[in-house]
Image: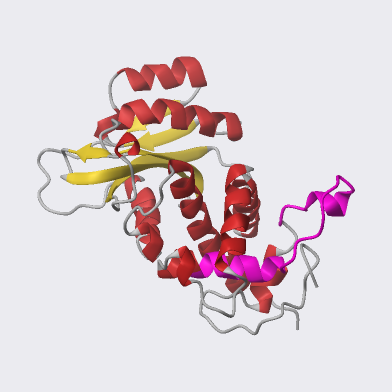
């Protein structure tokens, strides 16, 4: 009943964020396998992975403090240790990427994307965020941090980088697009808004073999207009704002803030997989 092999958790499903059996059936195969199960040493975890996943999902979706973890979950410090281990060893990104490949395959797409969209979102930072990783976004008038993301054409996350809010989009995009190009070798085209013009376009083509296509808003247009491709990334930002932990940046470390984004997206994808997968008759 412990670790990665758990199918019968010691608690009943009580919260909307708890995985259903259908979700767990989709989640269990792509879970990172602990070293002790592969003979690499270590010892079995003291708590079921399903309970740990449900606990982190509850925190991300409801925006609670770690110490406010409900009593029917494992102790908060054990859940935080689980979150920290998955953050520091990039296990949450690995898990997220496997789920994304499943969603894309289920929808008839190749597991690896060829096109994407890049954009950024500034959010206010809590008092726990230090001056070394926060700044003032003069355009949005926000004191906090900025989330730079690349998504595929389905709106699924390909990469995220959290910086101080005063870091320019073009500056962050150089590093983020390099990470995306290294991780997704078939990626050839990325759409962006007018904030990414300039030398970045030539840099992407020369250094990353990546076409950066700028989708500009016409000066003649008044009011709200849905622009081609750019709405896709806005849909992801809208999803993130439904996770209360992400409405404001509460994380001391930018790596934790990035991990929270990945956790939020896993909620979306597990629900989508469980909802749309054909059920056995």
Q: Nearer the viewer, residue 131 or 158?
A: 131
Q: Nearer the viewer, residue 9 or 77?
A: 77
Q: Nearer the viewer, residue 207 or 21?
A: 21
* Rendered location of residue 228, percent (x, y): 32, 46
Q: For residue 5, which quarter of the picture?
A: bottom right
Q: For residue 243, which quarter of the picture?
A: bottom left
Q: Residue placed at 65% from the left, 56% from the top?
A: 102
* Rendered location of residue 27, percent (x, y): 68, 64
Up the image or down, 243 lies above or below 1; here it is above
* Rendered location of residue 166, percent (x, y): 25, 34
Where does the N terminus fall, quadrant-wise?
A: bottom right
What is the span of residues highlighted in magenta in the rendered image? Answer: 31-58
Where does the C terminus fall, quadrant-wise?
A: bottom right
Which residue is farthest top?
206
Colour scheme of the rendered structure: secondary structure
User: Would residue 53 be counted in the magenta stretch?
Assistant: yes
* Rendered location of residue 196, percent (x, y): 30, 29
Q: Is 13 left or right of 44, judged from the image as shown?
A: left
Q: Residue placed at 51% from the left, 64% from the top?
A: 268
Q: Residue placed at 37% from the left, 56% from the top?
A: 235
Disc count in the image? 0
Q: Residue placed at 70% from the left, 65% from the top?
A: 49
């Amino acid at each position: 009943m412990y670790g990665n092999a758990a199918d019968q958790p010691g608690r009943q499903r009580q919260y909307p964020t708890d995985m259903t059996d259908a979700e767990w059936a989709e989640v269990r195969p792509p879970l990172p396998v602990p070293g002790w199960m592969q003979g690499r040493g270590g010892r079995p975890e003291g708590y079921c992975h399903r309970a740990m996943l449900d606990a982190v999902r509850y925190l991300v979706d409801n925006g609670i403090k770690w110490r406010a973890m409900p009593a029917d979950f494992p102790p908060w410090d054990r859940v935080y240790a689980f979150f920290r281990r998955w953050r520091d060893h990039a296990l949450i990104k690995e898990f997220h990427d496997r789920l994304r490949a499943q969603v894309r395959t289920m929808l008839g797409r190749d597991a690896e994307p060829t096109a994407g969209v890049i954009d950024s979102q500034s959010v206010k930072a809590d008092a726990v965020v230090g001056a070394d990783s926060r700044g003032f976004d003069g355009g949005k008038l926000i004191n906090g941090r900025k989330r730079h993301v690349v998504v595929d054409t389905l709106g699924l996350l390909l990469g995220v980088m959290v910086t101080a809010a005063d870091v320019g989009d073009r500056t962050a995009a150089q590093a983020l697009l390099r990470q995306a190009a290294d991780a997704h070798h078939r990626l050839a085209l990325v759409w962006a808004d007018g904030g990414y013009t300039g030398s970045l376009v030539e840099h992407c083509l020369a250094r990353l073999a990546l076409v950066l296509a700028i989708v500009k808003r016409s000066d003649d247009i008044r009011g709200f207009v849905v622009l081609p491709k750019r709405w896709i990334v806005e849909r992801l930002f809208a999803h993130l704002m439904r996770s209360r932990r992400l409405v404001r940046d509460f994380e001391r470390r930018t790596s934790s803030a990035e991990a929270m984004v990945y956790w939020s997206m896993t909620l979306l994808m597990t629900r989508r997989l469980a909802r749309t997968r054909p059920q056995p008759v």
